Image (tube, rainbow, N blue to C red):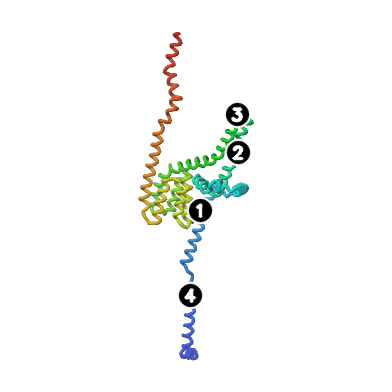
Amino acid sequence: MEAIINAVTDRSFQIAALVSLAAIATIFTVLEPLLVKDKLKERMKSVGNYRDNLRKQQRDALAKKTKGLRNTTPQGAVKELVESLKLLEVFDADSARKKLMMAGYRGQGPVFTFMTARLSLPFIVAIIAGIYVYLLDGFELDSFGKLMATFGGFCVGFYLPSIYISNAVSKRQKSIQETWPDALDLLLICVEAGMSIEAALQKVGDEVGPNCPELAEELGLTTAELSYLQERKQAYVNLAERTGLDSVRGVVTALVQSEKYGTPLGQSLRVMAKESRELRMQEAEKKAAALPPKLTVPMIGFFLPVLFAVILGPAIMSIMSTQ
């Protein structure tokens, strides 16, 4: 015990102990940043992993919803034919891609299919028309008339894919335009309730899905693009390009301004919802005003002859009986 007390009270031992403690403290100070884990970095990493999982789930869900011709990749002979003949350059692939996107057909597969149809349908329709007028004698035409009928079939086949896509675009735009004012009202309610724009778009898409699957699909795509695109503005611009409607472009402009300058979104959505409802009412009034001229020809052709027969029939029968 005395030896321990003497060692502790020895000045040289005390100096050695203090030097050792100082060395240990220095080593601990240097190595502490390497040993301590950054909790914030770990949390941000977990948030990033969760976001990546959500993106993957959304992409898988969108792939299931848009499977088929609307979201396919070109394969096989179609791709080789289009690339070998350079049809993407001949038929203006960018314009065709925009029209197909407005019609609801996305990806490279529909573009290659459309180009192949524009190349093959003229010859197919011309062959069918030639067989009908030359071999089956469907019409009593001379040789020049049969040649012109075959050429007409070629022209019809050339424009047939474009006519089909134009009709698909008009039907889709009409369906979206009819539901858009109601969707804006729902979006306004969600935004004013404190929901984020992604959650609001997702909620509106779920609500309008049974009545308008096209609009629900577009809102779902916008929600997915907002989560993984680097610029949120591009997601809104893509929505306007996919729909091609002026009312949607106005809302997209308001959303972009809100994202960029922090302007209040609720007031803009309220005004645009009112304008969309007025525009829908004007379209209905325009159709109602165009109804009487459209009914003139059917009334003259079907209603008036029956009316004349009912009025003049008894008089004619009485005259014939007296004679």
Name the residue carrying label 4. Answer: 32
Q: Is residue 154 above or below residue 21?
A: above
Residue 127 placement (x, y as % from top left) = 61, 36
Q: Is residue 66 visible?
A: no
Label 1: element kind: helix
**Which of labels 3 and 4 is toward the front?**
3
Q: Which is closer to the viewer, label 1 or label 2?
A: 2
Closer to the chain start, of discs 3 and 4, is 4
What is the spatial separation of the Cα atoms under label 3 and label 2, in whole angstroms?
A: 22 Å
Tell me which corner region of the image, top left, top right, bottom left or bottom right, holds residue 306.
top left
- Of callouts 1 and 2, which one flags the residue occurring earlier in the amino acid sequence? 1
Q: Are marks 3 and 2 in contact (CB under 8 Å)?
A: no
Q: Which mark is residue 124?
A: 2
Q: Is residue 261 left or right of residue 103?
A: left
User: Sequence-wise, which precedes: disc 1 or disc 4?
Assistant: 4
Cα distance between the residues tagged 3 and 1: 62 Å
Say whether marks 1 and 2 touch (CB < 8 Å): no
Amino acid type of the residue tagged 3 in the rendering = Asp
Asked whether the residues under the numbered discs 3 and 4 touch, taking CB atoms below 8 Å apart as contact, a structural biologist would say: no
Amino acid residing under circle 2: Ile
Mark-to-mark CA distance, 1 and 2 = 41 Å
Q: Residues within 10 Å of mark 3 (few under 14, many from 20)?
A: few
Residue of label 1: 58
Q: Residue at x 43, y 19 (%)?
A: 310
Cα separation between marks 4 and 2: 78 Å
